[in-house]
Amino acid sequence: MRRLWGRLTSVNVQKAVWGLDEAGLPYERVAAGGAHGVVNDPGYRTLNPNGLVPTLEEDGFVLWESNAILRYLAATSPALALPADPRARAHVEQWVDWQATSFTPAMRDAFWQLYRAAAPDRALIAASLEKSEAMAAILDRHLAERTYMVGEGFSIADIALGCAAHRWLNLPAERIERPALHRWYERVAARPGAARALGEPIA
């Protein structure tokens, strides 16, 4: 039995969904978080004391934190196996962490102000977009002569950053054109494993 708790409009849930679908693993998804509630129920808190999504249940094994779920899938699913070379593996890990510590935090205020705030704070939006552009520039430079984030193969770094890029490229805001970033995003977003994760409107 494999169950994933979370709503598809959550960028973190999208990562877990993409990972599971890319690996070809069957699972039941239970809508939770946001308007769905559930995350403050005592039963859910026994699974994830943070009251956040996603949470993965698998035959009594419970795991939360989206990038930890991606790493687990990479360790257990041949389709997502990390590179054998330690340096290439370290680069995959580097970019997965960069998504969580740099790119996504940079755009957080813009997203929340544009989609959640009753009276959007334009100064917060502008500052967040400026930070996000700096992160997008890093990605664009990195991808200028690359097919995937690391080496010649698709990896969990492409999933983590593909979900973040999906949000960035669909924000209702003006952005600097980043050709390499766009080419890479279109390539990874066209994968069958991405269809469910990236199929929901940004909200």
Image (tube, rainbow, N blue to C red):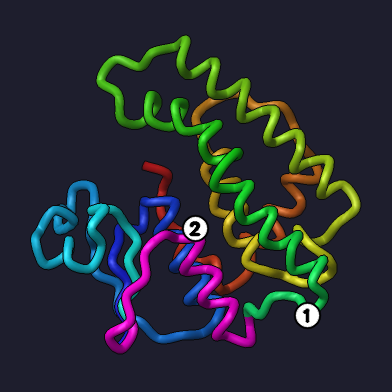
Label 2 secondary element: loop
Find residue 198 and name its label: 2
Most foreground residue, 148 or 201? 148
Most foreground residue, 182 or 34? 34
Image coords of residue 15 (percent x, y): 49, 61
Q: Is residue 64 magenta?
A: yes
In the image: residue 173, left or right of residue 140: left
Looking at the image, is 47 positioned above or below residue 143? below
| N-term-proximal mark, 1 vs 2 | 1
Question: Which amino acid type corresponds to the residue marked 1 in the rendered image?
Answer: Ala
Q: Residue at x 52, y 32 (%)?
A: 107
- Quadrant in the rendering for residue 16: bottom left
Q: Residue at x 82, y 46 (%)?
A: 142
Label 1 secondary element: loop
Residues shaded magenta: 58-79
Q: Which residue is mark 1?
A: 84
- Quadrant in the rendering for residue 177: top right
Question: Which amino acid type corresponds to the residue marked 2 in the rendered image?
Answer: Leu
Image coords of residue 133 (percent x, y): 67, 28
Q: Residue at x 78, y 41 (%)?
A: 140
Image coords of residue 55 (percent x, y): 32, 66
Location of the C terminus by quadrant is top left
